[in-house]
Image (spheres, helix red, strand yellow):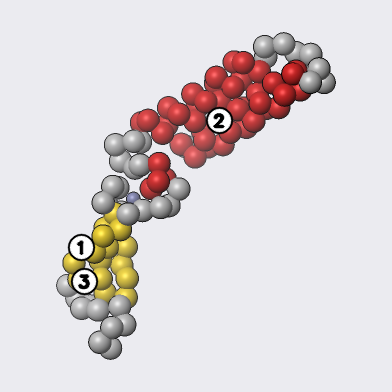
Amino acid sequence: MLEKMNDIGIIVLGFGIILMVAHLFDVVSIPYVYVPMIVIGLLVLIIPALKTKKHRSPLCRIGLHSFVHKHWDEEIKYVAIYECERCKKRKKVVRSAGG
Ligand SMILES: [Zn+2]
């Protein structure tokens, strides 16, 4: 749902910018149609980002997590468990050291 919203926001914002550029260069004369399009596009992009801010930072949203080593897997001792400092996303990393 949020990702769909994101796509719509990018499309609306993109068209708004295209119309603005077209208008500036007198290619298409639809004055000020692009202004609400850009505003709506930005709002659609920003609102979901604000809503999810508590859970995921923008860096996490694009996959740049800040993983820190938390502990070792209880069952498999050479599997390290990393947790993102910001969004608490976990990943397991198999360590070959000592093996
Ligand atoms: Zn993260």
- Using residue 73 as the reference point, say whether residue 45 is left or right of it: right
Whether label 2 touches label 3, CB < 8 Å? no
The residue wearing badge 2 is: 9
Residue at the extreme front of the image, as rendered: 25
For label 2, the SS is helix
Q: In which quarter of the image is the C terminus?
A: bottom left
State whether residue 67 is above or below residue 98. above
Q: Which of marks 3 and 1 is in front?
A: 1
Counting residues from the start of the chain, the first of labels 1 and 2 encountered is: 2
Q: What residue type is labelled 3?
A: Asp
Amino acid marked by disc 2: Gly
Q: Which amino acid, by three-letter code, is at mark 1?
A: Lys
Q: How many labels does the image show?
A: 3
User: Which residue position holds label 1?
Assistant: 70
How far apart are the two marked residues, 3 and 1, measured between alpha carbons? Answer: 10 Å
Find residue 73 and report its horizontal and vertical position in percent: 21, 71
Disc 2 under 8 Å from ligand 1? The reply is no
Determine contact: label 3, label 1, CB under 8 Å.
Answer: no
Q: With respect to residue 70, does 6 lie above or below?
A: above
Residue 27 is situated, as x and y percent measured from the top left of the image, at: 82, 21
Q: In this view, does 22 lie above or below 8?
A: above
Q: Residue at x 43, y 27 (%)?
A: 47
Dividing the picture into quadrants, the one containing residue 32 is: top right
Report if the CB atoms under discs 1 and 2 are less than 8 Å apart: no
Determine the secondary structure under disc 3: loop
Residue that mark 3 sits on:
73
Horizontally, residue 22 falls left or right of residue 40, namely right
